[in-house]
Image (cartoon, grey):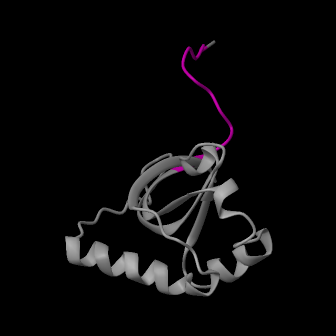
Amino acid sequence: MRIRKGFVSNSSSSSFVAIGFIFDQDKLGDAVSWEDYDSIYNKNLSVYNGSEGGLEDNEIAFGKEIFTSDDEGSSMNTASFSLEEINDISEEIKDALKEYNLDFPELKVFGGTRCS
């Protein structure tokens, strides 16, 4: 009989690194509602919230993934970005969200792990 002493799980997860804007949900208020998220996804943006999105529980972020990897690393994508390209991504995110009249905080690079 074989005994496994390490972590065992039947679930899978993926890791990511994203560029985006992180907002405090309380300060964001009603500017963007849960119903708006489908529209945001349709603009090729991702919405991240809470610990699953690599954020604090009261945070929400809108951004673009620049790196992903699953449990086996089989979908690992690597990339490098110039500051000009990062600025372009920033402007793309702002343009996609302009209808919400947000006061954008500092652009951030953030990452996390989520169930897939």
Where on the picture, by quarter, is residue 102? bottom right
Q: Position of residue 20 (x, y in %)?
A: 45, 65
**Residue nearest the observer in this picture, 52 or 90:** 90
Whether residue 25 is situated above or below residue 93 in the rendered picture: above
Whether residue 30 is situated above or below residue 13 in the rendered picture: below
**Residue nearest the observer in this picture, 55 or 12:** 55
Identify the residue at horizontal 58%, vertical 24% (top origin).
Answer: 7
Q: Is residue 39 shown in magenta? A: no
Where on the picture, by quarter, is residue 47? bottom right
**Residue nearest the observer in this picture, 72 or 45:** 45
Q: Left of 61 or right of it: where is 18?
A: left
Q: Left of 110 or right of it: where is 13?
A: right
Quadrant assignment for the C terminus: bottom right
Identify the residue at horizontal 47%, vertical 80% (top origin).
Answer: 94
Quadrant assignment for the N terminus: top right
Identify the residue at horizontal 36%, vertical 63% (top origin).
Answer: 77
* Magenta residues (range): 2-14
Q: Left of 105 or right of it: where is 9?
A: right
Q: Is residue 7 shown in magenta? A: yes
Q: Position of residue 50 (x, y in %)?
A: 64, 47
Identify the residue at horizontal 39%, vertical 82% (top origin).
Answer: 91
Q: Position of residue 73 (x, y in %)?
A: 42, 51
Whether residue 101 is situated above or below residue 110 in the rendered picture: below
**Residue nearest the observer in this picture, 115 or 55:** 55
Report the predominant secondary structure element of the magenta stretch.
loop
Where on the picture, by quarter, is residue 69? bottom left
Whether residue 85 is situated above or below residue 115 in the rendered picture: below
Give the farthest residue toward the right.
35
Could you tell me how many numbered marks the image carries?
0
